[in-house]
Amino acid sequence: MATLNVLILVCLGYVVLLFGVAFAADRMAAAGRGAWLRSPLIYTLSLSIYCTAWTFYGAVGNAARSGLEFVTIYLGPTLVMLSWWWGLRKLVRVGRTQRVTSIADLISSRYGKSNTLAICVTILAVLGGTPYIALQLQSITLSFSIFAEADPSGLYREGSSVFWVAAGLAVFAILFGTRNLDANERHHGVVTAIALESVVKLFALLAVGIFVVWGVAGGVGPIMDRIDASEIGQWNVDAGRWTTFIFLSAAAFICLPRMFQVMVVENADEGHLRTAAWAFPLYLLLMSLFVVPIAVVGLDLMPEGSNPDLFVLTVPLSQGNDWLAMLSFIGGFSSATSMVIVTAMALSTMVSNHLVMPIWLSTQEGSGSVSGDVRNVVLLARRVSIAVIMALGYYYYRLSGGGAALASIGLVAFAGISQILPALVGGLFWRGATRTGALVGLTVGFVLWIYTLLLPGMGGAIMPDSVLQNGLFGWGWLRPRALFGIEGMDPMVHSVMWSLALNTAAFCVTSLLSFPSPLERLQGAQFVNVFDHSVSPAGWTGSVAQSEDLMIMTQRILGSGPAQEFFQHEAEAQGGRSSLPEPTPGFLERLERELSGSVGAATAHAMIGQIVGGSSVSVEDLLAVADESAELLEYSSQLEVKSAELSRTARQLQEANTKLTQISEQKDGFLSQVSHELRTPMTSIRAFSEIMRDTDGLSAEEQTRYAAIIHDEALRLTRLLDDLLDLSVLESGRVNLNMGGDTLSSILDRAVSSALAGSHPKLKVRRSRPSERIPLHTDLDRLGQVFINLISNAQKYCDADEPVLTISAHDVGGQIVIDFADNGSGIPPDAQSMVFEKFARVGGDKAGGAGLGLAICREIMQRLGGEISYLPGQGGAAFRVRLPMAHRQAAQ
Amino acid sequence: MNSGEDRKPTGVRPSLFLERQGYRRRRLMDAARLLPILGAALVAIPLLWPSQGAPEGGVPLSSAILYIFTCWALLIVISLIFGFAARRMAGSDNSEAETDRWPH
């Protein structure tokens, strides 16, 4: 029988071996040798910290109690690994591009580098992780006690052994987990040690399994018979638990801080996932292959009431196979230590980055640049965090008394940490997920988990039985194990279902209703579309003077060597002559990412913000700039409108100018026309008056004739002057309209009779009187003048043998239209546009008019609100007079 | 399926039809995406089994073990094959960046 002393010696030897391996691996990595340290095999093996002592020992115990249910814990991660192509690959890519240091950092980074979220996740992780660490301590202690029972010397004391185990693990984690500050760098030492431990535990479990199957039971056939014959010999797994546990373990596999640490943070190459996708499920399969045989044989061999959780140890011991038991013990020890170390590392990173650093930074606020050695502060924070977390685990173990209450804590921790899942998956695949949504979802899930699972599981001291029986405040629907009155469910299934369902619902609904900040939206795009573009949002600008401050700060965080190297590299990349790079947005962005590898995204953002300070361009500023440019755009479009207006005005002015020039020309033309028109009669008047004055002996007849000519010419002059006066009055708009009411018919009657008075040969006027019964309210005299002019024009110019003028009136589109059409040859097309011009005469001077009649008509009609136009294509000359209906209505 | 001559460069999404290799690669990705669904379906089958105490008798544990471990091994083998195929594809393509731009 191996004594306790031998056991302790073996343990210490094993720990020394681990130290040695970790140390050597770190040395090799530092020297640049050891490519195998970054091999897919090491990566896969490091993933096996998923299998803790709880699974190493507990799986057999679980199988002994409920058959194959234990296998769910392995099937979940298997399914996750199988979906690596669209799941884990994205997670790992995001983790690497964003230089994520922990799951809290990932969530915080996704939701706009929010530290609040990071704190929530950290607290959740610590709350879930501490009992888990206690569980590992318990398993180590229990396995010690098995050997102690068999050791007669009785030197073993449980309390102190737990303390020393916890202290030793803390030292290991501190030594190898906080060697380098950049948590995003690989911890080759720790990872290699973990890989070794996972080989040891697999080997141990396989050894025990092979011993049980072939050594005790006598082969595969007999063990199968034995399994069927045992008390767990039939399939007896509750469907709800089966599904829930598979889902839960899958969720926990992604969300557990230690899994995230080895899977994402320690990942050296995305391609490793390809190997891990089949190798890790294989590892899990091997781990669970002999669990049921060991459980069945244990149930057979061991006395009633012995702890099935320890069958892995006690079965070889009972068969007298001490060395196998020792190996098995080392296997369990390995499982416990590796899990504790990585968990402590992961949690300490989270605590120091998201709890300690923000507090420390806020005490440094206002000092411009960061004072003190940040490097030491972060490292110290991390080391202290490890110690504190281990101490918490230790005290939790002592408080819980190490009893059976701890055994169920593994799944409880799974359920707790799975509350991160909606925010995580939502953040990776849904751009609409917002910080508020994540916060609300997490809070809802967290509270429900505590209320329905954690507190009821802790016993009567914390949650009184009355609450458990009657619900909080006596409200029945708030019973922790029968929320909303749904009873009869397995407590675990009940809690997981409600907490995750309501968590997801709250997350989705709040995300839908809330509006993300610009930084969140940018980060969201980066996360969701990580394969499309792997650039981070540009956020900073700075002046050269700040480069030095940045350098000082970076040295304090990264250490002077790496910092100088980084700055030098950046300066060279910028092509500058100085050793300090310009603080371009690109440089600041890379620097932020570099720093976030050490202190987390939110802290790095805040630190750079402190230095670049006033001139830091936040995304909000960028958006404001965008707004400004939008304003500029608007302004320029206003300018455009104005310039368009100006050019329109200029065009109008030009037109006006042209018109003025035309008018001026017209005026000149008019003056020459008028003088010409005046000169012709004046010439004849002068000539005949000279004849009458100078010629003697004119006959009376001649005198009368000459006087008549002079009289006629004077009359013509008077008429011309009258017309000109009339036209000028009309054109200047100073005409007074004498409005009156009458029917169109009577106006036409008067016009016809006055126009045709004394004319010869008589023009025949054809009218349709019924249609002329239109009452009018207008200047009757002026309208009559127009009509007279049109009728006398027809009389003068109509060259038909039997001249006929047809006057017709209609109502067209709300206007009164009066057409005057004769049956003559009409006006030639080229003259049609000229007839309304002054002094325009068609067909020579034969009628003796001054050519002002139609011009006056046009002016009158304009004054009356209507118009007069030539109507071509009527066979003869045709004029159309339009009068607005308003005059008619006004008359009614 | 179209041959290479039919490809028309039209920008980011290169063409409607891919050459044979690209086509195979995409179907491989489809298979990778379907694999977890197959896995989920396989592990969900035990939900249909009668449980202990059923009148016709429950499923013997040995059969259950055989079923689950066989399925498990099957999934691992498929995943292994896919892993190797993906590596070969990526190798023949010799640009990791391009594999990343496959539509998802």
Image (cartoon, rainbow, N blue to C red):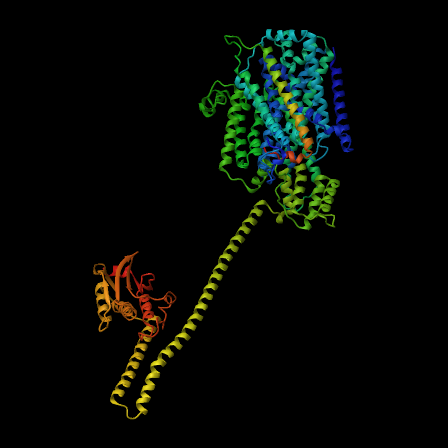
Residue A463 visible in the picture:
no
Q: Quadrant of residue A85?
A: top right
Whole-percent x and y of residue A54?
63, 19
Q: Is residue A845 above or below residue A499?
A: below
Quadrant where the C terminus of chain A lies?
A: bottom left
Quadrant where the N terminus of chain A lies?
A: top right
Residue found at the far front of this picture: A801
Q: Is residue A204 above or below residue B2?
A: above
Whole-percent x and y of residue A234?
56, 10
- Left/right placement of residue A688 relative to residue A215 reads left
Whole-percent x and y of residue A673?
38, 76
Q: Is residue A446 above or below residue B46?
A: below
- Left/right placement of residue A34 relative to residue B65 reads right
Q: Is residue A739 above or below residue A231?
A: below
Residue A858 visible in the picture:
yes
Residue found at the far bottom of this picture: A696
Whole-percent x and y of residue A420?
57, 30
Depth order, front residue of A319/A657: A657
- Left/right placement of residue A570 relative to residue A248 reads right
Q: Quadrant of residue A663?
A: bottom left
Mark count: 0
